[in-house]
Image (cartoon, rainbow, N blue to C red):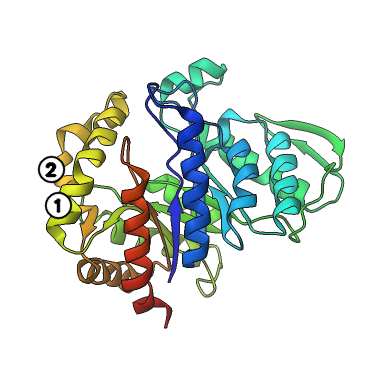
């Protein structure tokens, strides 16, 4: 089992952004020293929170993360030109020594598509074409592409990736068709672990594995990442007391978007079914359930909106000391 972090770089507009970003880089260095395996940045445009952009954040994080994998979790790929992303991530792959992951998704916030002048309809097809073109460019060979959304006359990528064939591509997805698409197109399905439906992950994982089999893709050696909300404290009561107010604030802020209004209406269900706020013993038991399903890379948000960075550090330290050894032996 690998353990990674979601670099939740979204802040109140009242915050000192430079200070907060500095705290995040300090936290990343601390995580690298503690033995965490990966860190993932996020992507939103014209957000209701101050949200620094992912490629810039990744480039800076490379200098603060030791040997950790650094990726996007996720990049809203239909809002970008795939030639741009192929060149940027090939550059990051070179700069990082081959420890980059391109995590992508189709997006869900209508106003982001409107702001960038991209139709939201058929965004799944846009994503599929973009992934296909990026992979072709990463081959290093001359590419000519004629798709419905993207066209490229014969050209070769200007910056070849260090990793043969390019960095791994993970695809975030929640809907059934999107999970199937992740199996067809991606090197991994980046599973969202915050559905209030207890059966969601197992049902979706079965669907994903069936689609892999249908396309002749092996499960062996494949990454099975899942993103969760997690906070570790000496007792369950302390974990809830220290983390829940900040998690509630962040979820309620996200719920201002129509597509996520359910997160406010059903927050109590999220607390019971998906927010992993507990003692080391609690968290070991919960992670065992992910492990039994087949997930092998747990990626969690270490802090929420407004949480003092000292609390996040204490949680990471306790988790590294008391939880990680149960899965790293």
From the viewer's perspective, is 274 left or right of 213?
A: left
- Callout 1 environment at 10 Å: few (<14), some (14 to 19), or many (20+)? few
Residue 5 drawn above or below residue 256 = below
From the viewer's perspective, is 323 left or right of 135?
A: left
Q: Residue 66, percent across and down?
A: 61, 60
* Quadrant location, the N terminus: bottom left
Residue 159 drawn above or below residue 298 = above
Q: Residue 46, percent across and down?
A: 47, 20
- Determine which residue is flagged by label 1: 272
Query: Residue at position x 68%, y 38% from top?
Result: 85
Q: Residue 186, percent across and down?
A: 56, 54
* Quadrant location, the C terminus: bottom left
Residue at far bottom of view: 329
Q: Residue 22, percent across and down?
A: 51, 40
Q: Which mark is residue 81?
A: none
Query: Residue at position x 53%, y 68% from top?
Result: 222
Seen from the viewer's position, the closer of residues 193 and 78 is 193
Label 2 SS: helix
Query: Residue at position x 57%, y 60% from top?
Result: 68
Tell me whether the residue at label 1 lies in contact with that at label 2, contact meaning CB atoms closer than 8 angstroms: yes
Query: Residue at position x 56%, y 68% from top?
Result: 216
- Label 1 and label 2: CA atoms lie apart by 6 Å
- Callout 2 environment at 10 Å: few (<14), some (14 to 19), or many (20+)? some
Q: Which mark is residue 268?
A: 2
- Regarding residue 104, the answer to whether it shows in the image is yes
Residue 274 drawn above or below residue 295 = above
């Amino acid at each position: 089992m690998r353990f990674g972090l979601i670099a939740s770089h979204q802040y109140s507009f009242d915050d000192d952004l430079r200070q907060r970003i500095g705290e995040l880089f300090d936290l990343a260095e601390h995580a690298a020293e503690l033995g965490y395996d990966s860190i993932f940045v996020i992507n939103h445009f014209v957000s209701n929170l101050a949200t620094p952009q992912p490629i810039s954040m990744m480039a800076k994080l490379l200098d603060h993360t030791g040997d950790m994998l650094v990726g996007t979790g996720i990049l809203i790929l239909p809002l970008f030109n795939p030639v741009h992303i192929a060149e940027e991530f090939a550059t990051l792959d070179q700069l990082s020594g081959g420890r980059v992951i391109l995590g992508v998704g189709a997006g869900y916030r209508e106003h982001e598509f409107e702001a960038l002048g991209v139709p939201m309809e058929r965004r799944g097809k846009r994503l599929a074409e973009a992934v296909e073109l990026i992979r072709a460019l990463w081959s290093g060979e001359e590419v000519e592409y004629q798709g419905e959304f993207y066209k490229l006359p014969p050209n070769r990528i200007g910056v070849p990736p260090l990793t043969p064939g390019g960095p791994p591509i993970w695809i975030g997805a929640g809907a059934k068709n999107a999970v199937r698409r992740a199996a067809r197109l991606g090197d991994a399905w980046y599973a969202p672990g915050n559905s209030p439906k207890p059966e969601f992950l197992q049902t979706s994982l079965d669907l994903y594995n069936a689609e892999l089999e249908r396309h002749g893709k092996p499960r062996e050696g494949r990454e099975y990442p899942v993103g969760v909300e997690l906070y570790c404290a000496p007792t369950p009561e302390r974990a809830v007391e220290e983390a829940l107010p900040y998690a509630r604030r962040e979820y309620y802020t996200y719920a201002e978007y129509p597509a996520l209004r359910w997160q406010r209406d059903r927050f109590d269900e999220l607390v019971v079914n998906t927010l992993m706020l507990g003692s080391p013993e609690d968290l070991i038991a919960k992670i065992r359930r992910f492990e039994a399903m087949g997930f092998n890379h747990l990626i969690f948000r270490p802090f929420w909106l407004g949480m003092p960075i000292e609390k996040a550090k204490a949680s990471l330290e306790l988790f590294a000391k008391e939880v990680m050894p149960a899965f790293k032996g």
